[in-house]
Image (tube, helix red, strand yellow):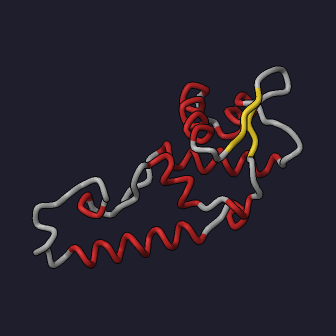
């Protein structure tokens, strides 16, 4: 398993929003400047976070983005899954991939267990933990 730049940046964006508090919206320009992420790439990632329901957005002069729930209610796992699609250690663990050897594969239980360990760990960490 390797976390892509998109996943790492999504986590950085969420931490940036968490550090900004809940009083108002944060502009993409401010996030871009602080996190040193290009505006184009930032727009792609924030669109996923918004569509996935992790952040609220507002247009206009005072617009931008903000978290829509307390920081302790965001797990690292949910943020990464939203941007990475899967964190499975091997393709056959991914629910969308059907392996023809699944019923006879002696390593499949180990891969399933590793996937469970990874997801349990990531889901046990929250934005609050990272702050």
Image spot of residue 117 (x, y percent): 43, 75
Q: Does residue 100 appear to the left or right of 35 in the view shown?
A: left
Image spot of residue 56 (x, y percent): 72, 39
Q: Name the quadrant of the C terminus.
A: bottom right
Q: Residue at x 62, y 38 (%)?
A: 50
**In the figure, residue 102 lies in which quadrant?**
bottom left
Q: Does residue 39 appear to the left or right of 34 in the view shown?
A: left
In terms of depth relative to the viewer, which is nearer, 12 or 114? Answer: 114
Image height of 86 relative to 60, above or below: below
Q: Does residue 30 appear to the left or right of 50 in the view shown?
A: right
Q: Residue at x 66, y 59 (%)?
A: 74
Q: Does residue 5 appear to the left or right of 43 in the view shown?
A: left
Q: How many marks?
A: 0
Of all residues, the one furthest to the right in this rendering is 23
Image spot of residue 55 (x, y percent): 68, 43
Q: Residue at x 32, y 63 (%)?
A: 89
In terms of depth relative to the viewer, which is nearer, 96 or 66? Answer: 96
**In the figure, residue 101 lies in which quadrant?**
bottom left
Image height of 65 relative to 117, above or below: above
Of all residues, the one furthest to the top in this rendering is 60
Q: Residue at x 63, y 48 (%)?
A: 12
Image height of 95 relative to 23, above or below: below
In terms of depth relative to the viewer, which is nearer, 29 or 125? Answer: 125
Q: Name the quadrant of the N terminus.
A: bottom left
Image spot of residue 52 (x, y percent): 57, 44
């Amino acid at each position: 398993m390797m976390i892509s730049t998109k996943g790492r940046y999504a986590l950085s964006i969420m931490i940036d929003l968490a550090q900004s508090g809940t009083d108002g919206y944060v502009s993409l320009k401010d996030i871009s400047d602080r996190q040193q992420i290009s505006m184009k790439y930032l727009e792609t990632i924030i669109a996923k976070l918004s569509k996935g329901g992790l952040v609220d957005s507002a247009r206009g002069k005072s617009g931008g983005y903000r978290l829509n729930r307390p920081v302790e209610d965001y797990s690292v796992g949910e943020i990464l899954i939203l941007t990475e699609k899967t964190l499975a250690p091997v393709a056959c663990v991914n629910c969308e991939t059907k392996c023809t050897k699944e019923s006879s594969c002696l390593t499949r239980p180990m891969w399933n267990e590793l996937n469970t360990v990874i997801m349990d760990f990531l889901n046990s960490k929250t934005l609050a933990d990272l702050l």
